[in-house]
């Protein structure tokens, strides 16, 4: 499922690549650089709407102190600099889509399929998915799974589906506020539930929401959900614990917005050898148990593994050497430095 | 050294000794306290190191800052005495601090 903020793709619509990098975090982005230097044309796919992965999603403004030669850099700045560094290689970016299926073809290449139905053929796959796909957090209520997709939604695909419903929106950020404002006119009734009477969302949205409450168009309830009621996936009501006790809120549609968490997701079903939800790789090529499928960064494991961005950069460089062999089997790879090689400098656009 | 006690939902209690200067989350992780996940590693970005401060200690641990309050919105069964343990620095003042681990971290 794509996330609510599914983004702006920079795609030419091409469907065949030398390499697909899954994950646009710092390590996935640097893989584009290392692959580019050895003439491997790359497409990057990420479930988020923008590059940076955890760096820009979890701590865009927090400084990182262990990137060599950068005494202090924020997650966002590191992402921006990597995007600038890989620009010469013209990688294709597909944002807001999750790779769901990966299958080897008869010709040795791979078929990839995203949750948006996009199919891509590639010679090499590089899994740089960090902690896994960012997935909406599921409220920890017993039995809520049974309602997902029918009455409980983590993103709104079609507003019309919610017309005439008794909608319960839970959360205090922008997603909760935006959907409150958007759905108020078409819902039969709308309750916004949040644990405190303060909202993280944009101040003007908070103002608009409070105006709707004052006009009696929506209800704002301060409390927390403790139980869901319903039958066969059809939600009927939710028990809410408030300062005054318990209340049963009638609702046949619920939109919980509790942020994102990381889940390994479909990678687990691709037949790769795993070690406690991490992908086993060798330390020469960072290749998985399947030839042509590599795993780099936080998602891999090998003896001595450290989940550091700088380790991921190293892994990307070694991975690219082997990827080159698969993509250009007849070409000899000459080891070169960007400082002195005129051919590398040409690729970087500095000569 | 400072003593910290974590009480699990089933009543089991574990007391750990750590040096001042660490965060309570780090103290918990170093001593394998169950139920403290700390998915983001202490960046106040995930709300999976949530604890309840025992009565009597709330004044000493202080109130959550705004960013911590915002992140607590994402935690499960948040109460008045809820804190994210990665945002509490261990000081000698906190010797004896007792906390409860919630039933779930989401």
Image (cartoon, coloured by chain):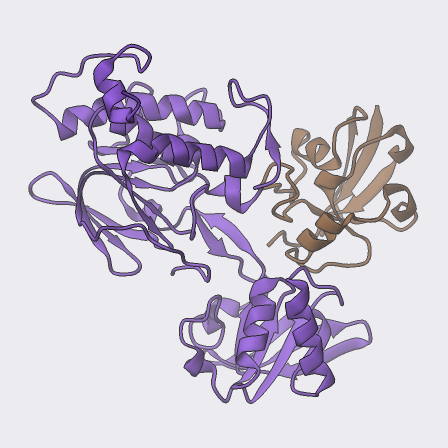
- Which chain comes out brown in the rendered image? B
Q: Is residue A216 left or right of residue A255?
A: right
Please identify the residue farthest to the top as the structure is shown. A340
Q: Quadrant of the N terminus of chain A?
A: bottom left
Percent x, y for residue B46?
61, 47
Q: Is residue A235 above or below residue A130?
A: below
Task: Say which of B36 and A134 sits in front.
Answer: A134
Q: Residue at x 40, y 71 (%)?
A: A157
The answer to whether one can see residue A62 in this image is yes
Q: Is residue A246 above or below residue A327?
A: below
Q: Residue at x 82, y 76 (%)?
A: A244
Percent x, y for residue B77?
70, 60
- Which chain comes out purple in the rendered image? A
Q: Is residue A35 left or right of residue A136?
A: left
The answer to whether one can see residue A295 in this image is no
- Residue A128 figure quarter: top left
Q: Is residue A250 left or right of residue A118?
A: right
Q: Residue at x 30, y 21 (%)?
A: A318
Percent x, y for residue B61?
85, 42
């Amino acid at each position: 499922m794509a996330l609510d903020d599914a983004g702006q793709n920079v795609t030419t619509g091409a469907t065949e690549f030398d390499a697909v990098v899954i994950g646009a975090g710092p390590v996935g982005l640097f893989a584009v650089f290392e692959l580019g230097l050895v003439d491997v044309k790359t497409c990057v796919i990420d479930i988020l709407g923008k590059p940076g992965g955890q760096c820009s999603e979890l701590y865009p403004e927090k400084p990182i102190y262990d990137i060599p030669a950068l005494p202090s850099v924020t997650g966002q700045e590191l992402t921006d600099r990597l995007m600038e560094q890989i620009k010469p290689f013209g990688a294709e970016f597909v944002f807001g889509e999750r790779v769901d299926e990966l299958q080897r073809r008869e010709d040795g290449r791979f078929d990839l399929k995203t949750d948006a139905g996009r199919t891509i053929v590639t010679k090499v796959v590089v899994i740089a998915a960090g902690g896994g796909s960012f997935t909406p957090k599921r409220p920890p209520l017993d039995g809520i799974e049974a309602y997902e997709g029918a009455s409980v939604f983590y993103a709104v695909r079609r507003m019309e589906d919610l017309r005439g419903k008794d909608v319960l929106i839970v959360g205090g950020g922008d997603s909760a506020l935006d959907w409150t404002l958007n759905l108020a006119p078409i819902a039969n009734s709308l309750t916004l539930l949040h644990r405190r009477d303060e909202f993280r969302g944009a101040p003007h949205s908070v103002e608009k929401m409070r105006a709707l409450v004052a006009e009696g168009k929506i209800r704002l309830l301060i409390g927390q959900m403790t139980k869901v009621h319903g039958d066969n996936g059809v939600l009927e009501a939710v028990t809410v614990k408030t300062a005054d006790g318990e209340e049963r809120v009638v609702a046949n549609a619920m939109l919980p917005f509790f942020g994102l968490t990381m889940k390994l997701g479909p990678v687990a079903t691709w037949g790769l050898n795993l070690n406690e939800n991490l992908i086993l790789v060798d330390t020469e090529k960072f290749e998985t148990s399947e030839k042509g499928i590599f795993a780099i960064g936080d998602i891999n494991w090998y003896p001595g593994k450290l989940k550091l961005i700088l380790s991921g950069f190293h892994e990307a460089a070694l991975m690219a050497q082997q990827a080159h062999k698969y993509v250009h089997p007849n070409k000899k790879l000459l080891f070169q430095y960007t400082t002195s090689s005129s051919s590398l400098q040409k690729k970087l656009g500095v000569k | 050294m400072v003593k910290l006690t974590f009480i699990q939902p089933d009543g089991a209690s574990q007391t750990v000794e750590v040096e001042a200067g660490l965060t309570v989350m780090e103290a918990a992780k170093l001593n394998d306290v169950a139920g403290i996940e700390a998915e983001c590693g202490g960046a106040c970005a995930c709300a999976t190191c949530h604890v309840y401060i025992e009565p009597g200690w709330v004044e000493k641990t202080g109130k959550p800052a705004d960013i911590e309050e915002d992140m607590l919105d994402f935690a499960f069964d948040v109460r008045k005495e809820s804190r994210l343990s990665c945002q509490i620095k261990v000081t000698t003042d906190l010797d004896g601090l007792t906390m409860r681990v919630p039933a779930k971290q989401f």
